[in-house]
Amino acid sequence: MTRFFLRRLVGGLPTLLLVTVMVFALTRVLPGDPALLLLGEEATPELVAKLRDELGLNRPLYVQYASWLGSLLRGDFGRSLRDNARVAPILWQKLPTTLELALFALLIALLLGIPTGVVAALRRGSATDAGVTVLALSGISVPNFFLGILLVYLFSIRLGWIPPSGYVEPWVDLRKNLSLMLLPALTLGTALAGALARFTRNSMLEVLSQDYVRTARAKGLAGRVVIYKHALRNAAIPVVTVLGLQLGGLLGGAVVTEQVFSIPGFGRLVVDSVFNRDFPVLQAVVLFSAIAVFLVNVLIDLLYAAIDPRIRYG
């Protein structure tokens, strides 16, 4: 398994290299001049040209890319164009916030999606099945920003149960941190929960129709043993696959969710860097997110072997 993990990492290097090219190219497509944004609209063309030269924006694009890639290989993400601060400390400062939100949302998605999918499969064709399907499709279809606003209106404005926005570090006030993160995590995890519920239901229906499940029931095994030990474990691989594919959407949805709830994480950092045309920060955040998605999918592949003993990686 260790060799498989290393092979996947080495095999992913061309993909990551392509990601760096795309990230660099897309940031340069953004309209607006960073030098002009820093100096203001009243700046003279001479001052703008001088600042562009100081920032290295006048160099050919391939030279800028080669310089940036060389810095990445040395572990240097560069400096922010806006305040000349090093990008790496900014990333490490924002990472725990977004990581907490993503893990909280993932936990909510697992707790809501898998049990409801199992129940819907066991009660196929019933009102419960139809209700789970409607809720799952609604969770997938409703945009994050709209759901977040609805939750704020209901639980914060109307009921007054939860603060509407803000963020407090868990080591400062854990209780307040959890109360502030609940609505954003619910907003972000709803779409993933809907997708998990649908795929769990479909996968369970397929497994429950297999001969070994009918044999286990015929041998007199308890219903819970048949469902959770035999059926659910064998139905888990497609669900885990979908989970890995959806995690990219989870990180993407954090951009909008963090804006709605004023959470100072990667999402806010992306929006601020886009508005300020802060290329080094934007490139680092997007590249870091892409690497995170790649590593998660490698771990998902390793998880297959833990779920199904028949899978072995040589």
Image (spheres, grey):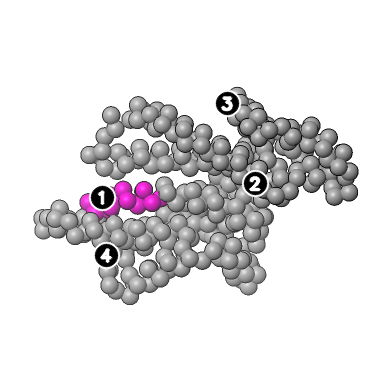
Compare residues 299 and 181 and report the one nearer the observer: 299
Q: Can you tell which mark lies on residue 29? A: 2
Q: CA distance from mark 2 to mark 3?
A: 24 Å
Whether residues under marks 2 and 3 lie with C-beta atoms below 8 angstroms apart, the answer is no
Q: Amino acid at mark 3?
A: Leu
Q: CA distance from mark 3 to mark 4?
A: 52 Å
Question: At x 33% / y 75%, what residue is drawn?
Answer: 127
| Image position of 151 (left or right of 89) | left
On screen, 62 above or below 242? above
Compare residues 173 and 254 and report the one nearer the observer: 254
Residue marked by disc 3: 73
Whether residues under marks 1 and 4 lie with C-beta atoms below 8 angstroms apart, the answer is no
Residue 194 point in image, percent of width and height: 42, 61
Q: Tell me the quarter of the picture where residue 87 sits.
A: top right
Instruction: Point out the stretch of residues depicted in magenta.
Output: 230-243
Q: Residues within 10 Å of mark 3 (few under 14, many from 20)?
A: few
| Mark toward the start of the polypeptide (3 vs 4) | 3
On screen, 203 above or below 4? below
Foreground mark, 1 or 4? 1
Foreground mark, 1 or 2? 2
Residue 35 point in image, percent of width and height: 79, 41
